[in-house]
Amino acid sequence: MSNRPQSTTDTTASVESSAATSSDTVAAKARKTLIPLLFIYMLGTLCLQAFNLVFQQVGSDVGAAGQASLITAVPGVVLGIVCFVYGSLCDFASLKRMTMFGLVLLWTGSILGFILHGSLLEIIIFRAIQTAGFQAAGSVYLVIVARYLHAGKKLLYFGMFTAAYQLATAIGVVCGGVFSAIDWSYLFLIPMASLIVVPMLLADLPHTTGRATHVDVPGFIIFALAVLQLTLFFSDLYWPLLAGAIATFVVFAVYIKRARDPFITPEFFRNTRWWKAVALMFLFYFTNFSITPLFNALGANVYGMTSAQVSLVLLPALIIATISGTSSGAIVGRLGRRTTITLGASLMFLGSLSAALCVLAGPVALTACIALFYGGMAMLYSPTVDTVLGTLPAEQSGRGVGMNDLAMQGAGSIGIAIFGTPIATNSLAGGNPVTNLIGASGAASNYTNLLLVYAAVMAVSIIWFRVNSRAIYGDSTADNGK
């Protein structure tokens, strides 16, 4: 048996082999956490959509019907902000610690929300804490898919993420309807089911990610404060909030220009292709948070339906949206991004316009109309996100994902803040050629007019996209972005 010293080459090869084995082990264990993480994300989304359905009832029960839309709007802003923060942190922080931190927030918001829900402020605070908690699992899921899965598997698990969101939305609407007839405070406890997956996450989540980097805490705080003030302004048009939002955005602009290492630089916002593309996400999802409460209020005030009955009427449309979302990748592969985006936006336009004309036609007709709307919205997500990220260099993709999520969630939050009042108070009731044509009056005319506004938003979205698509995609000959 030879006792010769091991050569440098042998030693290097051994170290590399050991590192590769260790990396493979981490990747294999990380993949085991995908379903548990997705389960947590679904519980949080389910809770979000359940409260979205019944926020009017919740607001009325605590004596704050006029500001009830903030129950959806403020957590929506929080969701957009933490999407950006978590995405940045995943570059260097421990995925295990981040997930467990999120779970602690989720459980804290759930328990305290169930115990303390006597005022609108308490409900908003604990819903925001819940929202900030569950999104950690969603962000870590996406990072693990991107970092540890092969290309073929990535498409499968990104598709599962989209399907999970749509399915959780469908179940959440049903839960909102059911619990509204019992006691809506029990909705706070739904995310506590996440306790069952903690052992798997503790055993298999990666503890470290590699490099360390700077976290621009002041930048995040200034930006978040500006967005929050802007959303609150749209809730009740309190003008000092708008002045505060503008002033804070100015402070943010000065900060990122002078800071040594800001989380985002002024050059990012000078990318014309990017802001034109991200405007699409804002326009497409402007009505996202308000469409479900609109139909809930319509069912109650026009047809005398309970929230539970409305949720069952909406369920087929949400199942169609689940199918549309999971099929969007195949649709893009066949039609290309431009055509798929145009098709999805057109379905949303037709859905809202036809619903406006069918307000008095009965719940079944409205279900068919809303299925067009939900199906089109689900179809839009993948090609629009791909379009937005395609306007950015690879080194800015993380910030691009975060800003995209913020635009989507922020748009929905501002939308519900604007539309929440007319949904609850019938302030848009009144006659016009369309309402006179279909014979709508009172509450029916209010919802007809709201749906016409939604159709107008989608018409503007389609026109914006068609006018700017050449600039967004960078040339006039791209084959639909395939």
Image: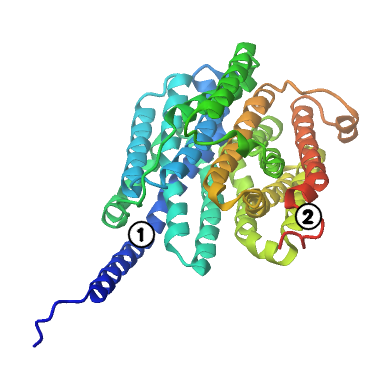
Q: Quadrant of the C terminus?
A: bottom right
Residue 57 seen: no
Question: In whole angstroms, how far apart are the C-alphas of marks 1 and 2?
Answer: 40 Å
Residue type at mark 1 is Ala
User: Along the horizontal axis of the image, is 190 left or right of 207?
Assistant: right
- Where's residue 182, x and y in %? 46, 34
User: Along the horizontal axis of the image, is 136 left or right of 59?
Assistant: left
Looking at this view, is 209 or 1 the one in front?
A: 1
Classify 10 Å Cα crowding around label 1: few (below 14), some (14-19), many (20 and above). many
User: Along the horizontal axis of the image, is 86 left or right of 436?
Assistant: left
Q: Considering only vertical position in the picture, is 12 above or below 196?
A: below
Determine which residue is flagged by label 2: 475
Classify 10 Å Cα crowding around label 2: few (below 14), some (14-19), many (20 and above). few
Q: Considering only vertical position in the picture, is 237 above or below 482?
A: above
**Residue extending furthest toward the top:** 240
Determine which residue is flagged by label 1: 30
Looking at this view, is 263 or 327 the one in front?
A: 263
Residue type at mark 2 is Asp
- Where's residue 33, x and y in %? 36, 57
Q: Considering only vertical position in the picture, is 290 above or below 380?
A: above
- Where's residue 402, x and y in %? 54, 42
Check whether the beta carbons of the residues at disc 1 and disc 2 lie within 8 A of each other.
no
Could you tell me which residue is drawn at 41 percent across and 46 percent down? Answer: 90
